[in-house]
Image: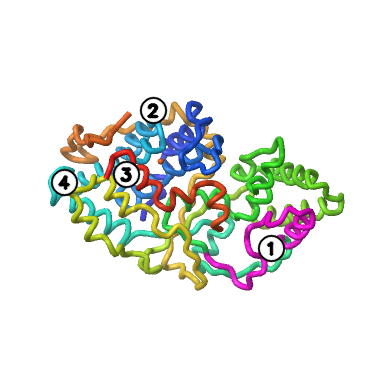
Amino acid sequence: MNFKSLLKNELLLSILHNVLMNETTKNKVSNASINGESYSYNRYSLLITIDIVIKYQIIINDNIYNNYFLNKLNTITNNYTTHEDLIIKGNSLLIDLVSNILNVTTTKTEDKKEILKYIYDKYIVNGYCFHSFPSIFKEKTEEEGLNGSIDIKELNDLKKIDYIFSNHNYKNIISRNLKDKSRAIYITDSPAMAYYYAFRSPEYMAEITSLSKYYNYLKNYNKDAFYLKDYNKCKSNLASLCQHVNMTTKEETTILKAFDKRWKALNLSESLPCIAFIKRKDLAKNYLSNIDEIINSVDKVDLNILISKITDSKYPIIRRYSDINSLDLTVITMPSYREIKNNKFIKQEAKKEKALITNETIEDYQEEKRFNYKYAFSYGNASVFALTGLLLITLGLTLTIIINVLGG
């Protein structure tokens, strides 16, 4: 899987930047937000966009299409009106590309079946699930694979922090069970959630520095601090929370020292989000029991809905207690939040990278095929998922949205 060339493309970074920093949508409230978190709308959009990118990479996996894909994705993300719109257009683009690869239409029964079979084979049978972690563990993971071993020094630091906050009735500031003798490897089949966790990894540092529910009690704090891996902002947030709960000087000092130790040990100032792509077949997650039913529904159900029935998340949280061999995974370093937010190349590089389809890239491609569907119009743990509303995406919000919009 050659993902690096796509991820290094400046147009992709510009697309992600524009989605995250979109001034016209930043104050909107997402349908995925349980608690109406208006600040998170663009983050949801970013996760949906990266979800499209990762699915494209797994299903298409051919660099010859990268420029065309990014050019179309750029158009979509510059013109979407809602998350529903973004998801449906992203699916439409994947359908468009697969139909071209197979040289089939999107109207004939057998052609539509071929499209579904192709996507099923690429995304499910020979596809991937995901585990996210900070880049300091990249080399070790590539060499040794994944295991649930516990770092005793890390555990002791976390227990200190949790104990002090609990004594002030701020319980479970760290959601992880610190009494577990072995640690699960958390895996998901959702690309959006994998990227979400990659931003937040390790979860306990995200919680104590900016993303715990207790930060809602503060009038002012930097919500992006951990996403940006900004040491000063994270430490300032934590110090403010310590003062808010009226800690003694000794308690606050203990908390901040433990924070400093973990930050340095994890080299978070230089950390990048990493995702291990784990073969579905090695997790026994490479089969859908209802695939024949899906394929045989092509004349009754919209193709976009059927694609979502294949690619939507079925396993938002997989807890694995046995090791995963390094041969069964591929580690990909993803664009970091700070890279995306602070992108310097926006307009000029996007223009340079803007790709028009050519005879050399896709022969005899018919331009009228793009979005000629009826729907091409102008989407560590359960408590964390619930707080952010993102569980809705992993449990089939994509499919729910598409059914609500298109019917069926």
Q: Does residue 5 appear in the picture of this structure?
A: no
Q: Tell me which amino acid carries mark 3.
A: Ile
Direction from residue 271 to residue 82 in the image, left or right? left
| 70 within the magenta span | no
* Residue linked to disc 4: 103
Residue count near mark 2 (Cα–Cα under 10 Å), binned few <14, some 14–19, many ≥20 = few
Q: Amino acid at mark 2?
A: Lys
Contact, CB < 8 Å: mark 3 with mark 2?
no
Residue name at image x 47 percent, y 30 percent: 346
Q: Which residue is mark 3?
A: 403
Residue mark closest to the camera, 4 vs 2? 4
User: Does residue 180 belong to the magenta stretch?
Assistant: yes
Q: Reading the chain from its start, which is encountered first: label 3 or label 2?
A: 2
Among numbered discs 4 and 2, the one appearing first in the sequence: 4
Q: Nearer the viewer, mark 3 or mark 2?
A: 3
Q: What residue span does the magenta drawing correspond to?
A: 158-185
Which numbered disc, 1 or 4, marks the residue that appears first in the sequence?
A: 4
- Residue hosting label 2: 351
The furthest residue to the right: 249
**Which is in the foreground here, disc 3 or disc 1?**
3
Mark 1 nearby-residue class (10 Å; few <14, some 14–19, many ≥20): few
Kindly report the distance in space between the C-alpha atoms of the residues bearing marks 4 and 2: 30 Å
Vertical comparison of 168 with 94: above or below: below
Q: Nearer the viewer, residue 192 or 212?
A: 212
